[in-house]
Image (spheres, rainbow, N blue to C red):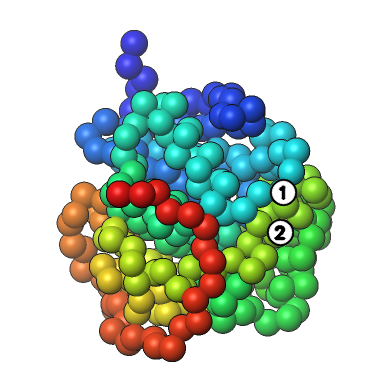
Amino acid sequence: MAATRGTIETREITIDGQLLQVAIRHGDGGGPPLLLFNGIGANWELAKPFLAALTSTTAIIFDVPGVGGSPRSAWPYRPSTLARLAAELVAELGYAEVDVAGVSWGGGIAQQFAHQFPKRCRRLVLAATAPGFTMVPASPSVLWKMATPRRYTDKGYMKQIAADIYGGAFRNDPSLIGRHAGAMHGARSMGYFYQLLAMAGWTSLPWLWSLPQPTLILMGSDDPLVPPINGQIMASLIPKAELRMIDDGHLFMVTRPGETAALIEAFLAGESREAAPATLLSRTNGRLTDLIPTSGGGREKS
């Protein structure tokens, strides 16, 4: 019996000996599913507002090892390891091709997936993210507050710092902080540390120019955690990139789920949408040069 469109099904699936908590938002089956990589320390439930706002898209999201319902892996991992795990999960679910989206920390994994498995990734969406350790960083005070998973385990602390690290709507609406904190669970210290360690020394800058996928880059104009210039840098390097600036903070996918879902679904459908001047800005045309190559993980052979 076919699942009802809009329902979210959760499963526990083992891939290469690693148990994963997987959530599938059922769509109409009209196109490739959207594989979504979440932010650091974030269980899949934090993406519920965005998943609920989708209209026709099937979406797949899983808790990375050590977060939410997925137990910690025996050893630390790299972005290339998670990309391979995700590719095997997608194959296990019966899909040969997906669209890929990544939010914040998960945007790095999304970039790695698109680079490592170009034939399996049709389109790419990068939200509130950056090209790894070579990014233009947040202020030291913001980075310090992000250094531990305390905001996921101490809801009072989360309410104290949310406006400072997320910006945007969190500065003016305390109820958003409470709802967001209420959806958090399962961030474990070692799992969080593994996520931090995974990105140590990783950068996509040397190979962004080679990404073949049409790419939508979404950045918050008031994002203390990932300054918007990082989106401009990526858009200037990815050949088929389109940059949109959203008049909000780091978590615009939570605070503006309807607007974000509409933009993403239009992009996945190959449609163009006019951007409201006060809310969205067009892609930058600059180009960066003199990049220093560093390793970024293996790539699937053609």
What is the spatial separation of the Cα atoms under label 1 and label 2, in whole angstroms? 7 Å
Q: Which residue is mark 2?
A: 197
1 and 2 marks in contact (CB < 8 Å) = yes
Q: Quadrant of the N terminus?
A: top left
Q: Amino acid at mark 1?
A: Pro
Q: Secondary structure at mark 2?
A: helix
Q: Decide which of tag 1 and tag 2 comes sooner along the chain.
A: 1
Residue occupying the point 34% across, 86% down: 287
Return the residue nearer the eye: 73 or 26.
Answer: 73
Image location of residue 214, percent across then percent down: 27, 60
Q: Which mark is residue 174?
A: none
For residue 290, say whether it is visible.
yes
Residue occupying the point 39% across, 88% down: 289
Q: Which residue is mark 1?
A: 76
Image location of residue 163, percent across then percent down: 66, 69
Image location of residue 54, percent across then percent down: 36, 43
Residue occupying the point 50% across, 47% down: 83
Vertical order, 253 against 165 (above or below): above
Q: Amino acid at mark 2?
A: Leu
Name the quadrant containing residue 35.
Answer: top left
